[in-house]
Image (tube, rainbow, N blue to C red):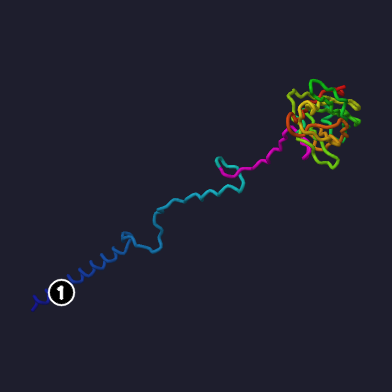
């Protein structure tokens, strides 16, 4: 019985030691060496880099290399260098060359037809323009001309231009220039004729006309050798 009591006490002491050891081990596991805990909401490593914003488009109308927009230049206005007779005369000048004072305008001129100087079956009349203004002006090229009847209707075709080299003629107030008007004598050529009431004359590079009474008789209007011809202006009256 005494042995049993000692054995029971030893077993109790052993059990108590094991309990104390287990308690110390449990306390140690609660310290700084515990495993990491997962916390919800923690950001992970970035997987995309920040992107630059897309470049804005060029403003409307801005010039860009190879772009389809471009400023359109207004078309530069051009001159043919020849006036017209507004339905009754031919083209007049052959250029716009002028010297100081500028070209002579129709309103600054007076027109006349000089005396006939016939020869070799031809009728030759000087068509004269005189500067009636108070300024110096110029003429360059051919006049326009057309024969008309008393009602103003054109008689015959427009005169053609004969070959020549236009020069600039400077007219001081009161000075004149002349251009030759030539056609075949109808009695020689056998052309059909009409007798005009007037000759309309258009200065070079002008549109307004000057009217001159025609007193030289019939002119060819159709048939053989019915064309009239005009020469370039030269200084003087052609007399």
Q: Residue at x 85, y 31 (%)?
A: 217
Q: Which quadrant holds residue 173?
A: top right
Main secondary structure of the magenta stretch:
loop
Q: Decide if residue 67 is on the left or right side of residue 119.
A: left
Q: Position of residue 8 (x, y in %)?
A: 13, 75
Quadrant of the drawing holding the N terminus: bottom left
Is 115 left, or right, of 224 in this rendering?
Answer: right
Residue 96 seen: no
Image quadrant in which you'd find residue 16: bottom left
Q: Residue at x 75, y 23 (%)?
A: 164
Q: Is residue 64 left or right of residue 84?
A: left
| Residue where numbered disc 1 is placed | 9
- Depth check, front residue: 156 or 13: 156
* Along the viewing direction, whichever of 53 and 65 lies nearer the viewer: 65
Identified at 84% across, 31% down, the residue is 104
Examine the structure image and report whether residue 83 is included in the region drawn in magenta: yes
- Secondary element under disc 1, as helix, strand or loop, is helix
Which residue is most to the bottom?
Answer: 1
Residue at 73%, 35% (x, y): give it. Answer: 79
* Residue 112 at x, y percent in the picture: 88, 30
Check if residue 95 falls in the magenta segment. no
Q: Position of residue 18 (x, y in %)?
A: 20, 68
Please report the bounds of the magenta region as a residue range: 67-90
- The answer to whether residue 46 is above or below residue 145 is below
Q: Position of residue 67 (x, y in %)?
A: 56, 43
């Amino acid at each position: 019985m005494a042995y049993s009591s000692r054995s029971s006490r030893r077993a109790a002491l052993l059990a108590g030691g094991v309990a104390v050891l287990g308690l110390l081990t449990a306390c140690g596991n609660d310290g700084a060496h515990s495993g990491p805990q997962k916390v919800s909401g923690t950001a992970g490593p970035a997987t995309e880099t920040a992107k630059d914003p897309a470049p804005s488009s060029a403003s409307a109308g801005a010039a860009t290399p190879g772009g389809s927009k471009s400023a359109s230049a207004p078309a530069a206005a051009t001159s043919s260098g020849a006036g017209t007779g507004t339905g009754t005369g031919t083209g007049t000048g052959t250029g716009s060359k002028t010297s100081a004072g500028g070209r002579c305008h129709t309103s600054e001129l007076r027109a006349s037809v000089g005396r006939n100087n016939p020869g070799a079956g031809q009728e030759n009349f000087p068509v004269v323009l005189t500067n009636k203004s108070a300024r110096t002006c110029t003429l360059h090229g051919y006049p326009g001309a057309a024969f008309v009847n008393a009602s103003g209707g054109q008689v015959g075709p427009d005169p053609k231009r004969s070959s020549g080299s236009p020069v600039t003629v400077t007219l001081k107030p009161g000075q004149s220039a002349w251009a030759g008007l030539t056609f075949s004598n109808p009695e020689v050529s056998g052309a059909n004729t009409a007798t005009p009431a007037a000759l309309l004359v258009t200065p070079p590079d002008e549109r307004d006309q000057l009217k001159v009474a025609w007193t030289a008789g019939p002119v060819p209007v159709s048939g053989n050798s019915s064309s009239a011809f005009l020469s370039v202006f030269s200084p003087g009256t052609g007399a």
